[in-house]
Image: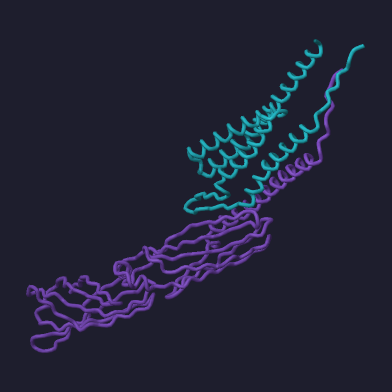
Chain colours: A cyan, B purple
Amino acid sequence: MRLEAHRKQNRVLTYAGRAAKAAVFFVINYAIFFFAPSSFFSTTGLLTSEIEATISSYFLVIASLTALNILLKDNVIGLASSVCLGLVQALYIYVITDGGVLTISLSGLALTLKFKMLLYLMMAIPAVNMLKQISDYLSRSSTQPIEMVEVEG
Amino acid sequence: MAGVAEVEQPLISKGFRLLTAGLGITLLLTLAAIAYSFYEDLAYFFQGLGVSEGLPQISINGTHLTVSGLTLANRGVYPLSVALRSDVKIGDADLGSAETGEIVVPPSMRKQIDLTLPINFSKAYTDYNLLKTVLFNATAATFEMKVDFGLQPFIGASFEGGFSGRIGAALEGLTFRLRSVEQLNETHVRADVEMKFTNASPLVVNGLLHASLTSTRQKNLQHTAPPIEVFAQPSQRYVGQLSFTLPKEELEGEMWYVLELKFDTLGHTYEWKAGFRV
């Protein structure tokens, strides 16, 4: 009975910790995937309703997948969400930067920025993170943690 | 006391973590260095364009357009690569283009860039409407410039912009005036009409001018002068003379006289009317 209660308490604590981590990651995701691109596009005058919608929808997907990944990291849904998260983040970076080519108009001058190398570097981070999650899950499933319970005499 | 014994992270997981961190740090440092270099270089570039002595000088002679005095300094931390490409147009006619190829400016160095464009005026000469415009009116020559700008090897940028420059008319300030009247016989006089203009265009004016004077006494009567050859290099002032043999009474009284002119040049004939007052 006590063991069951202890397990429940542990689970609650675990999920509370994960929820807090998810909240922190929500803020980080907001800064990276919503605030920074929105500010950049609005400063350069490139913010259109289409780009705004793209940023918002990708941000919502990224935030949801991050929350799922953190909350359910021990099971297969967590793994699936982390793989999807990596893919969505990489795709988002590619889509939002238009494949590494941005054109800005500056008082009669058209400025075209090409940054393919930087783009690949930016896309590599979620891709490597995705591989890490897969590797972590696979190694976890082959090496299950041992639960130790102290038995009162 | 109960607990879960943590399983030590496998080596591969640590490796991935290290790789992610390394990539993140590289990205941040690269972005910071690029932002710094870009800010420094762009600030210099626009500062240079903002002051008159930083502006490149553009000059046109008969066959070439030269852009000179464009100095670029790399104040960033990455090598700066610049390639200039420019096109010159009058109206819709493309007169020429040129490019410098890639010029690499190492950090803390400056380079002066000159660009010379060969200009092919044959398109302007063969287009009737364009040549007519150029002959009689000031036109705008568009100079479009593309600057490929790169902070090697991470970022490439290209500026595209253009400006228009005024090109004067080929027959700028074209005027006619009665220079002298000489008695030829009892019934006729020879009237010399001076024609002058300045060729303010970069085109060479070369053609045959036919002129006839409309009679003020008799309807539908034209007095024709022998055609004269008109030749003027760019920036040259031209003074020519049309000689009319007229009945004595034609030039009696102060009034405006109308000249009908036909200019044959490069296979086209341009017709117009001009006047002079006696």
Left or right, residue B104 beside residue B230: right
Residue B72 image-quadrant placement: bottom right
Residue sitting at x 26%, y 77%:
B264
Residue B34 located left or right of residue B115: right
Q: Residue at x 59, y 42 (%)?
A: A91
Left/right placement of residue B7 relative to residue B64 reads right
Q: Quadrant of the N terminus of chain A?
A: top right
Q: From the image, which quarter does the C terminus of chain A lie in? A: top right
Depth check: B2 or B128 in front? B2
Which residue appears farthest toward the top when viewing the image?
A1
Residue at far left of view: B218
Taking depth in this image into account, of B67 and B255 the one nearest to the observer is B67
- Count of numbered badges drawn on the protein: 0
Outermost residue to the front:
A142
Q: Position of residue B220 (x, y in %)?
A: 9, 74
Q: Residue furthest right?
A: A153
Residue ID at (34%, 65%):
B138
Question: Looking at this view, is B106 or A130 the one in front?
Answer: A130
Picture residue at 7% right of the left edge, 75% below the top: B218
Confirm whether residue B172 shows in the render.
no
Examine the rendered structure and indicate whether residue B245 appears above or below residue B23.
below
